[in-house]
Structure formats: C-alpha cells, structure tokens
Image (tube, rainbow, N blue to C red):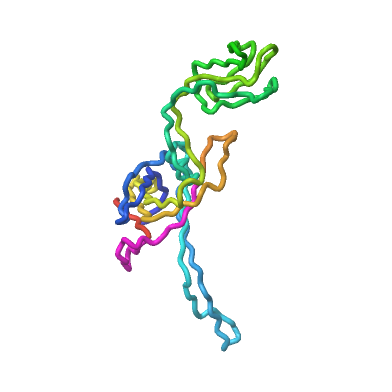
C-alpha cells in the first residue's frame, strides 16, 4: 500500500521544566510551513590498492538537525520568541508638565511624548501665568502615537509642557532574554492519506533570533524562525526512538 504524505495541522510550543517536560504550552497560531532538516558530517576513506580510489568507508563524525517554521500571527508571545525579548504590559497612567519641543521648537518638526495612546492632552507654555495652547492653531497632535507638531508659537514662551493621560499598551523588548528552548509538537493530519492523523514531537528546539523582519511589505506579513534540534538528556537513550523526537502515525 502506498503512503503519500501532505501534512497540515496545529503546532504547539512549550517551555521546558527541569525534568524536560513541556509547560506553558500554547499554539503560535497559523504555521504556514514547518520543516525538519537532518545533516551528518562524515569522513570518507578512499582505498589505494585497486587504482579506482573508491570510497570504502564513511565515518559519521557529527549529526545535526535544524527546524524551520513560518509563523503568520504577530502575537506578543511570537514576537518575544523571535526577538529574544520579553513582553510587559503598561497599565497606563497620567503625566503632568512633561517638557516637549525643547528650548526652541521648530515649526513643523515632530516631537514625541514619553507615551503613546494619549488622551486629555493639554499643552501650556512657561510664562509666569502659563498660557494654554490651542490644538489646531498652535499645534497638532497625533494622540495614538503620542506626537506633537507645532504650527505657530508666536508670543508664547518655551519650553512647552504637556499634561495627559495614557492608556494600556504592550511593549516587547529586543535581545533581553537568553537563547530560548521550546518543546515543539504538531497534531496534524495527512491530507494525502484520507486525513489520517499524525503526531510529531521535537523534544528540544533551540531557536535562533529572527533573521529578517519585513516590517513594511505589500504582502501578508509573516516571519520565519529557525532553530537547532538538540538531544534531550532527560529522555533515556533508546536505539529505536532516540533523544531528539518522534513521528507517530495514528491512522
């Protein structure tokens, strides 16, 4: 019986506890591509007796494997994994008299507030009796991004000061975490074999940082992650299944 393969399914990633067991398991969402590449580094010996210089021995020096997956969902967890970062949530708050524009703001230049997602914005000058600037006359504000451009400050005294409230946001750092290791599991179906179910587990994948992040693109944004498949010393060495992973045909 022929057994062709074309897999689809849901990928799960989990952290690993000290016993090598997956914890905090979640799906990164739609994974468009998932691949496993195996490689051996070998020494070849050539005989020198027959005049053919034929290979008569191949000695395997090293075994390695790489994993690659294409993720399409830009969640904070996915980005943190790809950027070697961590994500934090700023609950929001308020700011009073934040200097903006410096000692001599330039008309038309863009100045940034300390926080985005701004509301209830007021801007005053530094006169003895502070004057309140009028939005649309003295300045324009992009409250979502927390940015101000001055239009006309004639007769006003710099520096200017902004007071506002700001909303909750999620922030993701870059290169703030060590190399991440994940347990990877695919719960899939083989569409070339009547949707027979298949289970693939890779016990220990050490992910590289994101090589390329297409921030502006005409296509649907996605990012590709690559990593090395490492031996899991918490698994007993088994001549059949080994310490790297397994593929289970359920149907």
Magenta-colored stretch includes residue 237: yes
Q: Is residue 160 magenta?
A: no
Residue 89 screen position, x and y as percent: 42, 33
Q: Position of residue 7 (x, y in %)?
A: 40, 47
Whole-percent x and y of residue 59? 48, 75
Residue closest to the eye, 93 or 62: 93
Dominant SS type (magenta): loop
Query: In this rendering, would 185 be left or right of 110?
Result: left
Residue depicted at 59% across the width and 12% down the height: 130
* Front residue (pair 27, 251): 27
Relative to 133, residue 115 above or below: below
| Residue at x 33%, y 63% (from the top left corner) | 241
Frontmost residue, 78 versus 85: 85
The answer to whether residue 239 shows anywhere in this view is: yes
Q: Residue at x 55, y 84 (%)?
A: 47
Q: Which residues are magenta?
A: 225-243
């Amino acid at each position: 019986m022929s057994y062709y393969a074309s897999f689809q399914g849901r990928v799960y990633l989990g952290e690993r506890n000290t016993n090598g067991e997956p914890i905090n398991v979640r799906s990164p969402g739609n994974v468009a591509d998932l691949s496993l590449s195996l490689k051996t580094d070998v020494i070849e010996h050539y005989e020198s007796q027959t005049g053919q210089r034929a290979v008569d021995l191949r000695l395997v020096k090293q075994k390695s494997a790489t994993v690659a997956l294409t993720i399409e969902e830009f969640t904070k967890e996915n980005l943190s994994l790809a950027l070697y970062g961590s994500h934090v949530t700023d609950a929001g708050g308020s700011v009073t008299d934040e200097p903006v524009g410096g000692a001599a703001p330039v008309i038309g230049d863009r100045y940034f507030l300390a926080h985005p997602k701004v509301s209830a914005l007021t801007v005053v000058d530094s006169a003895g009796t502070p004057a309140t600037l009028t939005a649309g006359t003295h300045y324009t504000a992009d409250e979502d991004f927390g940015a101000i451009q001055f239009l006309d400050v004639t007769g006003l005294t710099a520096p200017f000061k902004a007071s506002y409230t700001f909303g909750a946001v999620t922030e993701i750092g870059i290169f703030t975490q060590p190399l991440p290791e994940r347990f990877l599991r695919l719960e899939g179906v083989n569409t070339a074999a009547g949707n027979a179910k298949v289970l693939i587990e890779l016990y220990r994948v050490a992910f590289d940082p994101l090589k390329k992040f297409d921030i502006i693109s005409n296509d649907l944004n996605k990012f590709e992650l690559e990593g090395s498949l490492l031996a899991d010393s918490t698994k007993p060495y088994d001549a059949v299944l080994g310490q790297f992973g397994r593929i289970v045909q359920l149907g």
